[in-house]
Image: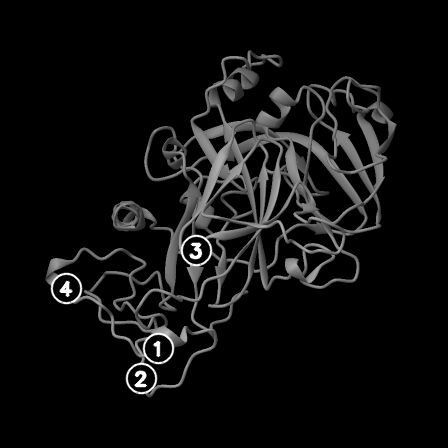
Amino acid sequence: MRNLIEHCGRVLALSLPVLSLGLGEARAAIEGLSGRDFVLTAKADYISTADGQSLLAWGYAAPDRPMQYPGPTLIVEQGDAVTVTLTNQLPVATSIVFPGQQGVTAQGGTGGRLTHEAGPGATCESSACTVTYTFTAGEPGTYMYHSGTHPELQVEMGLVGALIVRPLGAVNQAYNHPDSAFDREYLFLLTEMDPAIHEQVEAGRLNPDTGNYFPVLWFINGRNAPDTMAASNLPWMPTQPYNSVPRAHPGEKVLLRIIGAGRDLHPFHTHGNNTLLIARDGRLLSSAPGAGADLATSNYTIAVAPGGTYDALFEWTGQGLGWDIYGHTETDPMEPHESAEDHGKPFPVVLPTQLELTNGPYWSGSPYLGTAGALPPGEGGYNPNAGYFFMWHSHTEKELTNHDIFPGGMMTMFIVEPAGVPIH
């Protein structure tokens, strides 16, 4: 435990001072397109990386919107008759497949190895450039969709997105059982990139060598850290609209919808507490129908396999720390979800003086949740609610870099906000 604390302290001390963008607007609900009928266009455009690169990418676009990486999150209800119409503007044929969905049919385009394809936008007749896919949304859960045409290249180029099937009639549940109930939900779509492939495609090599694959960039929801923590829908990142800033009050259940959308395995690690893995690949971890998530497992790191999806619950109360996170005395009233055995216990160490500290921007000046303290002039300001920050990230060290520059990559921060602070 001491080694873990020292490791986390070193990482935070290095990373927090460089997160100069500040906290973006975090959303408690997953952003995306809801409904039954979706219209997407496959386009080429550029994405920005946190180390200053601009890479050509291919992606799916909503009507009158730029292409985006990853594609728009499609949110449907169990039992919906879903149609997805794809029009292709890329110089190569492309398509969509929907892993986990049964009975998918396609109209238009031409036959491909896995599904009907929309022909190259520059050369095909308009009817051959468009395909309509139809399926009935089956079991609730977290899924993905991606190109079924040369996926070793086209998924790498960006043709991938999330599909969420919500249970019919169940509010704030991931599945048809109360074991999957949550207060807030967040998406973590994990990918990686090899810029050399993108540079070859930009140079006109539409069938580049993908066998010598060597990624140097890692993404959550299409962004590298620290851009993961910037606001959603930024004008200077028009093709990467989704951020990743999970937030919650103590005692709230947070649902993590995690998708392994690349070709590598990513061990996704949550500081602050274990997650309870309740589902994999759109199926509740249940021993029998109606048994709930009785086969759920507690994990401090989830091994996210390529093509796999995972639903996990996370909850933080501060229980078991051995001190009162609110700085109460024994006669003070209890906060909701506060640990009774820790109530009124003092902070166990004496903090160094201001002259002996280098403050990170997210240090509130106080060790207590919801209480700000004195800070030197010009220091801090990025934690106005005096919350607690926990780094969530890949546990593969190289994936915490942007092209070998630390910190970056597959990393974000989970923030415990005091009760009563609005989380939008």
> How many labels were placed on the picture?
4
- Residue 373: x %, y % from top left: 25, 72
- Pick the front one: 97 or 49: 97
Q: Is residue 231 visible?
A: no
Q: Are marks 2 and 1 in contact (CB under 8 Å)?
A: yes
- SS at circle 1: loop
Q: Nearer the viewer, residue 358 or 44?
A: 358
Q: Nearer the viewer, mark 3 or mark 4?
A: 3
Q: Secondary structure at mark 2?
A: loop
Image coordinates for residue 43, horizontal then vertical, percent: 66, 30
Which dot marks residue 80?
Answer: none
Q: Are marks 3 and 1 in contact (CB under 8 Å)?
A: no
Distance Cα–Cα, label 3 vs label 4: 30 Å
Whole-Å distance between the Cαs marked 2 and 3? Answer: 26 Å
Q: Nearer the viewer, mark 4 or mark 1?
A: 1
- Tell me which amino acid carries mark 2: Glu
- Quadrant (top left/top right/bottom left/bottom right) for the C terminus: bottom right
Q: Secondary structure at mark 4?
A: helix
Can residue 11 be seen at all in this image of the molecule?
yes
Instruction: Report the residue at 33% width, 33% height from top.
Output: 405
Identify the residue position indicated by label 2 in the image.
330
Where residue 213 appears, as percent x and y from the top left, is 50, 18
Does label 2 or label 3 sit earlier along the sequence?
Answer: 3
Q: Report the Cα–Cα distance between label 3 and label 1.
A: 20 Å
Q: Which residue is mark 4?
A: 354
User: Type of residue at label 4?
Assistant: Gln
According to the image, label 1 marks what residue? 343
Q: Alpha-carbon distance for marks 4 and 1?
A: 27 Å
At 34% from the left edge and 40% from the top edge, which residue is drawn? 407
Q: Earlier in the sequence, mark 3 or mark 4?
A: 3
Query: Which amino acid type is marked by label 3?
Result: Asn
